[in-house]
Amino acid sequence: MSVITVLVTDDNPIVRQALCAVLAAEDDIEVVAEAGNGVDGLKAARRLQPDVTLLDYRMPVADGLSIVADLTRYTSVLTLTSDDTEPVIAAMIRGGARGYLVHGQFDAPDLVRAVRSVAAGEGWLSPAAVSIVTAALRTQDDKDRTERQRADFARRIGLTAREREILDLLPVGLSNGAIGQRLGLSEKTVKNHLNHAFAKLRVANRTEAVARWTAEGPATESPAPRP
């Protein structure tokens, strides 16, 4: 039976002790090192290349998010933290963590199963992480669907790629001059493209153009004040 090697990286020594005790009770798991901060954890992972690294998010010197991408070069990462907020979970998963456990949402058997799952190249998520990842996937699906709908609409009415670029910036609230600066065009060129786009959209002004264009999907940026 192959043994799964584990690095425990957490700034709380009591938490590290508890985690190590749970894992040490398993015949197929061996804790090969501990670290109390991100820098030491990364050094240990680089040196030992354990199968799995348990990684806390909030740590001194370097937190989990700042090292997760580098860690994944040497080990599979299982985030284990008390933070269950959407930005943190999403960032850690995007950074390469294969699993995310939230304190209070798992017990000792869950931890063992999670370590084995991550070591096998699979994933393991706490309920809070599952809901966030699911919501993110749905959001991306919605964005992809909206983009396809908008692209089909643009083809049907004959919008050029440049006209689409400019229309995408209208809901942001940029002036013609600001749009020109962003796209490397003169203000007059932007105005000409808009006039052509207005004709294809069958609208008379920017407000109507925004309403017609965004009806094919939401704006891709948050509104910004006109310069």
Image (cartoon, rainbow, N blue to C red):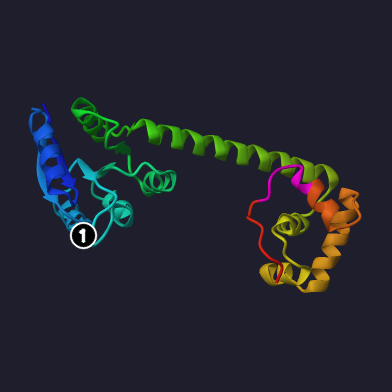
* Residue 190: x %, y % from top left: 80, 67
Q: Nearer the viewer, residue 210 or 84?
A: 84
**What residue do we see at 22% from left, 43% from top?**
54
Neighbour class for label 1 at 10 Å: few (<14), some, many (≥20)?
some
Disc 1 is placed on an element classified as helix
Answer left or right for 110 relative to 218: left
Which residues fall within the magenta stretch?
A: 213-219
Task: Name above or below for residue 51 compared with residue 46.
Answer: above
* Residue 60: x %, y % from top left: 23, 59
Q: Would you say residue 217 sits in the magenta stretch?
A: yes
Is there any visible trace of residue 3 in the rendered image?
A: no
Task: Name above or below for residue 208 compared with residue 97.
Answer: below
Residue at which label 1 appears: 39
Q: How many marks?
A: 1
Q: Would you say residue 117 sits in the magenta stretch?
A: no
Q: Nearer the viewer, residue 48 or 175?
A: 175
* Residue 177: x %, y % from top left: 75, 72
In the picture, the quarter occupied by the N terminus is: top left
Task: Name above or below for residue 129 compared with residue 191.
Answer: above
